[in-house]
Image (tube, helix red, strand yellow):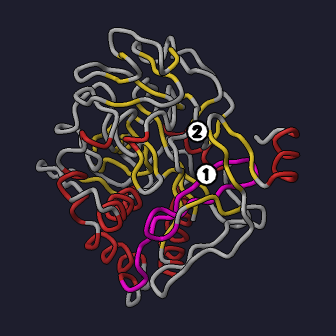
Amino acid sequence: MITSEERIQIEENGYVTIGSRDIVFINMPLPSTEETTPYYPDDNCRYVEGDLDTGLVIADENGNEYVWIEVPKSITKDANTKEELYNVLNTYSIDYKDTWDWGMDNSDVWYEGCGMTEEEYNNNYMKMLNSIKENGGFYIGRYEMGSLEPRTESSSATQSAVRIDMYPYNWVTVEEAENICETYSLGDRISSLMYDIQYNLACKFLEVKSDELTVADIAENSEKWGNYSEHDMQLIRGKYSVDEGNTWIDFNTNSEAVENAIKKNGQRAIITTGASEENRVLNIYDFTGNTFCYTLGNFQAGSPGSFLYSVIRGGVFRMDGTYMAASWNSWEDSGDKQSEIGFRNCIY
């Protein structure tokens, strides 16, 4: 939450210092085209930086930051039903969807333990699809969901924020993660975990808009732009941990894993949100690597709702980017809590 002192700073200067960055709050119309029309989720949101080509960033009144994920309206212009909208969006982002060889699939189908009732899940899914069609996109957190204090296996709920210099909000179940995401809803816009199709669309956005990334960089080897074990990575702020978050060290303190603020190749270290500019693409930090990302996708087997495995996406700090690229997916029991699984919210 923005403190009273921070709010005074905004009113007097138009910006606020959050963590190690000055965030400028500007009240201005957002850029738009025939293909995409970003919106302010409520009247208290403000423009921060970037544009439709470099990553458009807004913030809510508490300094939580979001990046617009463009999905061109021409993709969905002839689609209206749930099946039609899903099919065209799936075709558009097909490079980033996995289908398992043994007949199981990642599906946006309700399952017990996801944090919503079946009715809520299906209603929100249709709202998400219709919002993408109407507006040509949606927002995702600029950062992984963060915690104001370090989390461990014994942690209960902690203060969360979508801000820089936060500890990863790990050691959480899918239901707990979804409940946290819902507290970030703004106006009549819903905040939730990403549905699986939204994660694929975010991957497609990175491919289309970034001058740096190809399909292979997202689907096959994401080592150069994520916090992976086999990656030299310059840290410029925040903290890191070499024992899965039990202890945290300032970014410029040397250790076996980090020397002169460089996380060495072959070393495993989890980092706070936004600790390295090397992991920033289109103004989104740590989209891959660092922690896996819980989604609302269901690792589907058998009748709907019968398989309680949540789809997790992206890579993780302890592995290399050739094995677990940005679009990589697997599954985890929806009730599990692990140091290596976090989450990122979206708004639609």
Residue shown at the point (28%, 67%) measured from the top left: 93
Q: Nearer the viewer, residue 304 or 66?
A: 66
Image position, residue 244 (x, y; %): 42, 17
Q: Quadrant of the N terminus?
A: top right
Disc number for residue 330: none
Does 20 appear above or below 208? Answer: above
The 10 Å Cα crowd at callout 1, few under 14, some 14 to 19, many 20 or more, is: many
Q: Which mark is residue 164?
A: 2
Quadrant holding the C terminus: bottom right
Q: Residue at 88% x, 40% y: name it.
A: 4
Outermost residue toward the bottom in this view = 78
Q: Is disc 1 in contact with disc 2, using a CB cutoff of under 8 Å? A: yes
Amino acid, disc 1: Glu
Q: Going by the image, does 301 lie left or right of 338?
A: left
Residue 35 picture location, percent across and down: 45, 83
Label placed on residue 65: 1
303 on left or right of 252? left
Residue at 70 percent across and 67 percent down: it is 188
Cα separation, mark 1 vs mark 2, equals: 9 Å
Q: Tell me the kind of residue under disc 2.
A: Ile
Residue stretch rendered in magenta on the structure: 51-74
The relative height of residue 146 versus residue 63 in the rendered view (above or below) is above
* Label 1 or label 2, whichever comes before in sequence order: 1
Q: SS for tag 2?
A: loop
